[in-house]
Amino acid sequence: MTPLPKWMRSVLFTTAAMNIIGSAAFLPAAQNVREFAGAPDAEHPLYMVTVGLFILLFGIAYLATALMGRADRLFIAVAATGKLSFFGLLTLFWAQGTVPLKAPLSGLGDLVFGILF
C-alpha cells in the first residue's frame, strides 16, 4: 500500500461523493436525470441497477481509500482506467451520433478524475 498525498485524498473524497450521488441516476425511476445527462434508455431495469451498483461500490471504495490514506497501486490504476474508459465511451457514442453532445460533457468529471489518478 502506498501512502497518499493530501491532494490525492481530496481527489478521492470528491470522486467518492460524485460516484455515490451519481449512482442514483441509474435507478429506474431516475429517467429524467439520465435524459438531462444525455444517457440513452435502458432495455431492462436490471441493467441500469447493475451499472448504478458498480458506480456506488467504486464510490464507497474511493471513500474508504481516502479515509485510510493509502492505496494499492492496482486499485488506482483500475479506477483511472475505468474513469477514462467511461469518458471515452461517451465520446465514441457521441461521435457516432447515438448520444447527444451533453453525454460526453456530463462525463467531463470522470475525465478530470481519471487524469488526476
Image (cartoon, rainbow, N blue to C red):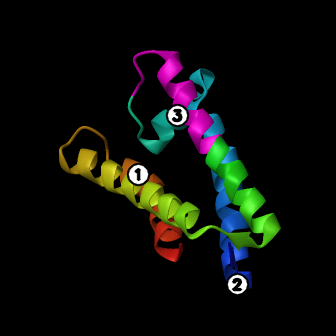
From the image, tell me which residue sits under label 3: 51
To which residue does mark 1 refer?
86
Q: Which one is closest to the eye, mark 1 or mark 2? A: 2
Alpha carbon distance from label 2 to label 3: 30 Å
Precedes in sequence: disc 2 or disc 3: 2
Contact (CB < 8 A) between labels 1 and 2?
no
From what the image shows, is residue 3 above or below residue 64? below
Which of the pair 60/30 is nearer the observer? 60
Q: Which residue is mark 2?
A: 5
Magenta region includes residue 108: no
Query: Which percent across, then down, holds residue 32?
Result: 55, 30
The magenta span reads 41-56
**Kind of residue at badge 3:** Val
Percent coordinates x, y for residue 10 in the rendering: 72, 74
- Label 1: state its secondary structure: helix
**Which quadrant would the N terminus be assigned to in this image?**
bottom right
Q: Where residue 57 appears, x then y in whole percent?
A: 66, 43
Local secondary structure at mark 2: loop
Kindly identify the amino acid type of the residue bearing the numbered disc 2: Pro
Residue 113 left/right relative to 70: left
Q: Judge from the rendering whether residue 21 lies leftward or rightward of residue 76; answer left or right.
A: right
Task: Residue at the far top: name it.
Answer: 44
Tell me the CA gap for discs 1 and 3. 12 Å
Q: Is residue 4 above or below residue 53?
A: below
Report the residue that reaches farthest toward the front: 1
How dense is the environment of label 2, judged by Cα within 10 Å: few (below 14), some, or many (20 and up)? few
Residue 31 seen in the current view: no
Decide: few, some or many residues near mark 1? Use Cα within 10 Å; few <14, some 14-19, many ≥20: some
Residue 74 is situated, as x and y percent measured from the top left of the image, at 53, 64
Which of the numbered marks, if any, corresponds to residue 77? none
